[in-house]
Amino acid sequence: MKLRNLIPLTLLAVSMSAISADNIKPLLLDDIMRFETLQTPVISENGTVLAVEAMPDRGNSRALVNQVATQKQYQIDGGSDVKVSANGDYVIATIAPSLLEKETLKKSELSAGLSLLNTKTGNQQQFKRVKQAEFSTKGDYLAVWFDIDDTKEDGKEDAEETSINGADKGSGFKLIQLATNTFQEFDHVTQFNFDRSGNQFVVAINDIAAKQHVIKKVDLITNTLTQVYKSDGYQVAELSLSDDGNWLGFTQGDASVERDEREYQLKLLALESLKLKQVPTDDDWTLNQHSKIFFSEDSLRLFIGRVPQVDKALTLASIESEADLFDQQIVTGLRDLKVWHGDDPKIKPHEVKQYAKELKRTYLAVMHVNANRIVQLADKAVPDVHYGEQKRYLLATSDVPYQKMITWAGFYQDVYLVDLNTGRKLQILTQHASGEMPSLSPNGRFVAYYQQGGLFLYDIANARKHSLTKDIAISFANEDHDYPGNAPSYGLGPWLADDSGIIGYDKYDVWQFSSSSFDGFMLSAGEGRKNRQQFRLAGLYATSDTPAVIEQQQALLLHGYNEHTKADSFYRATVGVPGVTLQLETEAKLTVLARSKNSDTMVFSKQRYDLYPDLYTSSVNTPNEASQQTDLDSQRDDFNWGAAELVRWRDGDGRPADGVLIKPTNYQAGKQYPVMVYFYRFMSDRLHSFPHMAINHRPNFAWYADNGYAIFLPDIRFEVGYPGISSVKALTAGVQKIIDMGVADPDAIGIQGHSWGGYQTAFAVTQTNIFKAAVTGAPVSNMTSAYSGIRHGSGLARQFQYETGQSRIAESLFKSPQKYIENSPVFYAERIQTPMMIMFGDKDDAVPWEQGVELYLAMRRTGKDVVFLQYEDEPHHLKKYPNKLDYTIRMKQYFDHYLKGVAAPKWLKEGEAYREYNQD
């Protein structure tokens, strides 16, 4: 595949896919089903190789692998979950069972494979029945762990093997030296680990024949194998190698005890002498099967997940004799009961949902290797310690004091500094918003955080809090926040080296703050607010464990989003120097997706409504010299697509409002078209977004445009306390605008929304007759009953959504019942003149599906035109493909009938009698 370089500074107005009118076809649902999207690009650490998964909405994926410099491309059929070796020489991809196999075979008959691609030669090597595969840190070895004992040709197990738990038994394993394509093979592997330096590898083996558990080490420099440990009767669980090559940490437990009840012990092996270090024990803490261990990068500390010592599990009651039949303690011991108490920290559904997670919870401790001392860091009062490579302190959080008030007030936590040497905790923030996690500086001297519209630094050594923004007139709170709760921040950026400062953001500009003078300046020199350009740092390499750190005078890439044009650009800035320089200006959306670790190469996508977001690579310093790496936009070559434009108007309160109008294929000025209105909150930032090519709960914009519809995506701004009517004001003013433009047929305007958009849809048709058909998915129809409903996915009550969140009432049902009634569609059912189709999955995990029943019954009772689609065993968003496709077809049939005058299908005219589908 030959791809073109990106040469112009401004994106070309014509799509790269040249479309010939002679070859145009109608866009059909099966075209959407086959349409591929790119997912999770990965670039090698040296920036030479890019791999990405191309996944159709329905069908089999393929992995695309590019040599970045030449754009030479390889393909791995069926490939997904790609990983690239550090040197870029090799790529692995999971080969999942094909869609046809998934549809026709039993689950027990399915297994995943693995493909190994040599990016120098294009050769591929296949492995069957693989459960895990990892490259070594340097990329010169590949570990392949099979889900069976791959060394047994007949696949049969000995009688003794059959009696052993699968995880304890282990499975086949190969360690492949990639340059020579030679391998070492192991049976019954239960765990493995590469060190971060890329010099060593260890593997734990259950030697069933010898009735021993052994650990073997491979020196990856010399490719030599050594047995370093063996034990009779003790199952090895976790492994961790120190980066300095001196230590192996591992856990082991009595193999004769069931895994769920097994206690594990921590072991530390000196790899030079092969002697075990005497590890301290603690009567209050132990390890279990969920305990993880890992070394710090400096190899001085071993972190451990521990659990409190508890009494052995209670024996379940059972009836075993005649006397037991009348033993009240035994009989009531068989009860099925949950007790809800008013003082419970969590309501029972939430507690139940969290139960499995809590069973697996461990509490972080640290072993100081040289001092041979273990310090417990987390406990039940402060359960969450946030790991980092800082040497003295870590941040810890606890929501324990606020678990009860989550029900109505939302999510809060206390924030602590925990001393790695002593375990002592110092509380630095109280009832802090959970979504505003503070940032600990790399050297552990400061904590940066947001509070009440400002940014602050906590000086750890002096135990003092300093405001960074007290002398700045601009607020650092979200300026578009229209929820009852406190406005969140725009986030914090990276720290400067040596803890000398930190980056922060207001709505538009990037700020650099000093940790010595506790003040700051606009790195973007005010150009953001001046031009309504939202600047953010981009293209920095970071991981969850290793955040980015920047240096003084370092060149930075800034991403700019223009609030007026909705277009993105790239700019250049320099740490410590105010000012920005334009690098790449587009009429498109730009998204930085990846950055190589050891080079300046980044991966970004570029998209418009009529341009697929293909991948480009460039230096972070010269994004205007990018090279195109993929060409999935060519999928559009056979189709018309419509065109998107920005529309502006004044909403019902006279405020400026924006929206996106997608004109239909072959649009003719002066002709009026049926319109699909789709919305949620802010939609105008989708002006340059390529439509999501999938069959789901939303209308597919390209499909509707190709079928003669205009699609309108208006922005909605809400008034706290009056979400329903404020939405209607924004909607009706926007719809009137496109009527006045001569685009919309005023007698053929439909509206569709899902969840919060579904609520707004249901409410809108109780207040206006401007819409001629409505489809509402998973709507709240009665806020008075939904207020204390349960979100079955999390087990949380819904009260907080109304008092502090999206539903925007701001008061409890008991203090302001009238607002709940005034904002509930069901109480205005008699006003509805618009035909409505309601859709719910009857296992909705966010909105109680009975909300759909209430709306349906209210409309049915008042003689309105209503249809209710109940999809069985489906959550908030439909998951089963037959149901998604069915809903997509019915939605289109519904709008075609009411907006285009197409004859109604039988189900819409007559309904469908109940029938039980036999799915056996």
Image (cartoon, rainbow, N blue to C red):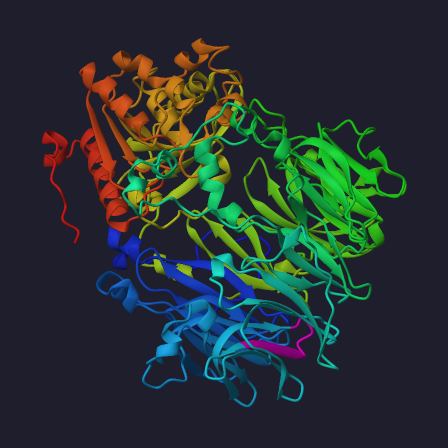
Say whether residue 590 is left or right of residue 493: left
Residue 626 location, quadrant: bottom right
Q: Does residue 491 appear in this view? A: no
Magenta highlight on residue 200: yes
Q: Position of residue 92 (x, y in %)?
A: 48, 73
Q: 570 or 233: which is nearer to us?
A: 233
Q: Position of residue 88 (x, y in %)?
A: 58, 75
Q: Is residue 235 above or below residue 605?
A: below
- The image position of residue 26, as x and y in percent, is 24, 51
Residue at the image position 67 percent from the left and 56 percent from the top: 540
In the rendered structure, which segment of residues is drawn in magenta? Answer: 195-204
Residue at the image position 55 percent from the left and 43 percent from the top: 567
State which quarter of the image contains the N terminus: bottom left
Q: Residue 795: percent from the left, percent from the top?
A: 44, 35
* Relative horizontal placement of residue 385, taking residue 739 as reference (left or right): right
Foreground of the two, 444 or 29: 444
Tell me if residue 500 is in the magenta stretch.
no
Tell me the quadrant of the picture where the C terminus can be found: bottom left
Pick the residue in front: 403 or 874.
403
Compared to 556, does 664 lie above or below? above
- Residue under the point 31% across and 13% down: 828
Does the image show residue 13? yes
